[in-house]
Image: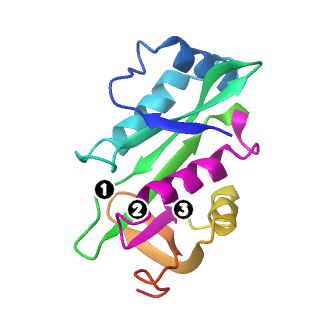
């Protein structure tokens, strides 16, 4: 399963060998992978965040060599109530291989003890992201309106400081 490393400093337009290999292997031929990744990275880094609350590359191995398989992170630092929102994106060729679940689990470990709770938003439909969140202990709370994304489904990881319905 992949490990997370900070995404800061690793350019998408001039990628490292590890990221270039992930792009080459992770996207179908003809896809503008750099554009897709740049858009995700732009969204993930739009709000400056300090410390743990940044963006991370998911680094796995393929044929014994490191390869970037996705990107994940926190959309913001903890709010006044201590809640953080996570987001993640798996490169298409690595979908269905457990990368998203591993990224979510790693983000939960980062947030543990440093935030009182974790939420996530998905498209307002049954999809793989909902299954990933459910496997990681999240509970579906319903549809909400996100100012950046419009209508979304809200998911919450229940904990003592983050009970369902809060």
Q: Is residue 166 above or below residue 19?
A: below
Residue at left 58%, top 77%? 140
Which quarter of the image is occupied by the N terminus? top right
Residue at left 28%, top 43%? 46
Which quarter of the image is occupied by the C terminus? bottom left
Position of residue 158 measured from the top left corner of the image (x, y, whole percent) = 52, 79
Please tell me the numbered disc located at residue 122. Answer: 3
Position of residue 146 measured from the top left corner of the image (x, y, whole percent) = 37, 66
Closer-to-camera residue (62/13): 62
Label 1: how many Cα within 10 Å (few below 14, some 14–19, many 20+): many
Secondary structure beneath disc 2? strand
- Between the C-alphas of marks 1 and 3, the distance is 16 Å
Position of residue 68 measured from the top left corner of the image (x, y, whole percent) = 58, 27
Secondary structure beneath disc 3? strand
Kindly report which numbered mark, 2 or 3, lies closer to the viewer in this rendering.
2
Residue at left 43%, top 48%? 73
- Which residue is identified by label 2? 85
Label 2: how many Cα within 10 Å (few below 14, some 14–19, many 20+): many
**Badges 2 and 3: C-beta atoms under 8 Å apart?**
no
Q: Within the image, what quadrant is residue 129 found in? A: bottom right
Label 3: how many Cα within 10 Å (few below 14, some 14–19, many 20+): some
Q: Is residue 27 visible?
A: no
Kindly report which numbered mark, 1 or 3, lies closer to the viewer in this rendering.
1
**Badges 1 and 2: C-beta atoms under 8 Å apart?**
yes
Please tell me the numbered disc located at residue 76. Answer: 1
Q: How many marks?
A: 3
Q: Is residue 132 visible?
A: yes
Q: Is residue 85 above or below residue 22?
A: below
Position of residue 67 measured from the top left corner of the image (x, y, whole percent) = 62, 23
Q: Is residue 100 above or below residue 29?
A: below
Q: Is residue 34 left or right of residue 97?
A: left
Instruction: Specify start and end residues of the magenta stretch as a single range.
Output: 94-123
């Amino acid at each position: 399963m992949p490990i997370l490393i900070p995404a800061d400093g690793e350019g998408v337009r001039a990628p490292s060998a590890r990221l270039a290999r992930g792009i080459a292997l992770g996207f179908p031929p003809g896809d503008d992978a750099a554009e897709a990744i740049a858009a995700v990275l732009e969204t993930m880094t739009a709000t400056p965040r300090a410390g743990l609350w940044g963006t991370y590359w998911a680094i796995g191995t393929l044929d014994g060599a490191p390869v970037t398989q996705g990107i994940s992170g926190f959309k913001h630092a903890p709010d006044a109530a201590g809640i953080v929102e996570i987001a993640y994106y798996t490169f298409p060729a690595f979908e269905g291989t457990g990368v998203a679940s591993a990224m979510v689990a790693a983000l939960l470990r980062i947030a543990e003890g440093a935030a009182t709770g974790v939420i996530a938003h998905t498209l307002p439909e049954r999809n793989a992201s909902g299954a990933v969140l459910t496997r990681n202990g999240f509970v579906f709370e319903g549809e909400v309106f996100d100012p950046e994304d419009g209508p979304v489904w809200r998911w919450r990881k229940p904990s003592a400081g983050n009970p369902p319905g809060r």
